[in-house]
Image: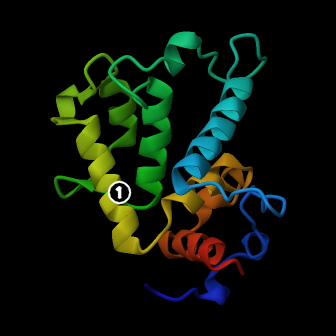
Amino acid sequence: MSTVNQHAVPDWARDLKTPTTEPPEGLPVASDAERIANARARHMAGFKKRNDPRAQYGFAYGPEHYKDYFGPESSHYAVQHLTFIAEVIGTLINGKELPSYKMRSDYNPSNGLFEALGFDLSQLRLAYEARVAELGLSEVLIEEFFSGSAGAHPDWRNLSFDQRMDIFRLQESGK
């Protein structure tokens, strides 16, 4: 695993903490799966609020956007979330970058296929998990990072890939 280059991390990101807290003494610590599920639930709640059909701004997604048709985490929302994070960490499918603009419109939630692109949701998940491991990152901390407001910071998109990875590694090290 590479070390964190403190100088490459922007000032606004140096003190970021994941939006989790330590459980009170005597209570069990949540498993990684529970932490991921909780982070995803927080993210979805915020996403739904920002994109409610009655909201003044947003994309006005209805309930069908969040419905899993093909299996768990197969809704348009879940795939949109996964493709965003997979893009951020540079996940490749069949040796190619993810064409997110095409992926979101090409995805069929009834069968889990990215039809014109020639792969399915399970292949995307496997490629994402392999990339997380290759980078030495924690899926838990990535999900927790994006469940809070840190991932939505206006400067986030302007960061280089290395700066983004350094932020994730700072999260992991607890610095």
Q: Residue at x 57, y 76 (%)?
A: 169
For the point 29% across and 45% down, which residue is it? 124
Q: Quadrant of residue 6?
A: bottom right
Q: Residue at 52%, 49% (x, y): give it.
A: 33
Query: Is residue 98 something that shows in the picture?
Result: no
- Residue 15 point in image, percent of width and height: 79, 73
- Residue 70 at x, y = what percent? 32, 21
Left or right position of 77 against 104 = right
Pick the front one: 136 or 33: 33
Q: Nearer the viewer, residue 19 or 22?
A: 22
Q: How many marks?
A: 1
Query: Would you place residue 162 above or below residue 142 in this image?
Result: below
- Which part of the image, by quadrant, shows the N terminus? bottom left
Q: Badge 1 local density, few (<14 within 10 Å), some, or many (20+)?
A: some
Name the amino acid type tagged 1.
Glu
Query: Is any atom of residue 57 visible in this view?
Result: yes
Rendering coords of residue 43 (x, y %): 65, 39
Find residue 21 and report its image quarter.
bottom right
- Which residue was labeled with disc 1? 129
The residue lying at 78 percent from left, 62 percent from top is 22
**65 on left or right of 96:** right
Check the image and name the residue furthest to the front: 26
Q: Is residue 8 above or below residue 78?
A: below
**Viewer-side residue, 160 vs 25:** 25
In what quadrant of the picture does the C terminus appear?
bottom right
Using the rendered view, name the quadrant where residue 9 is placed.
bottom right
Q: How is the image coloured?
A: rainbow
Left or right? Give the position of 170 relative to 12. left
User: Left or right: 52 with respect to 143?
Assistant: right
Q: Position of residue 83 (x, y in %)?
A: 42, 43
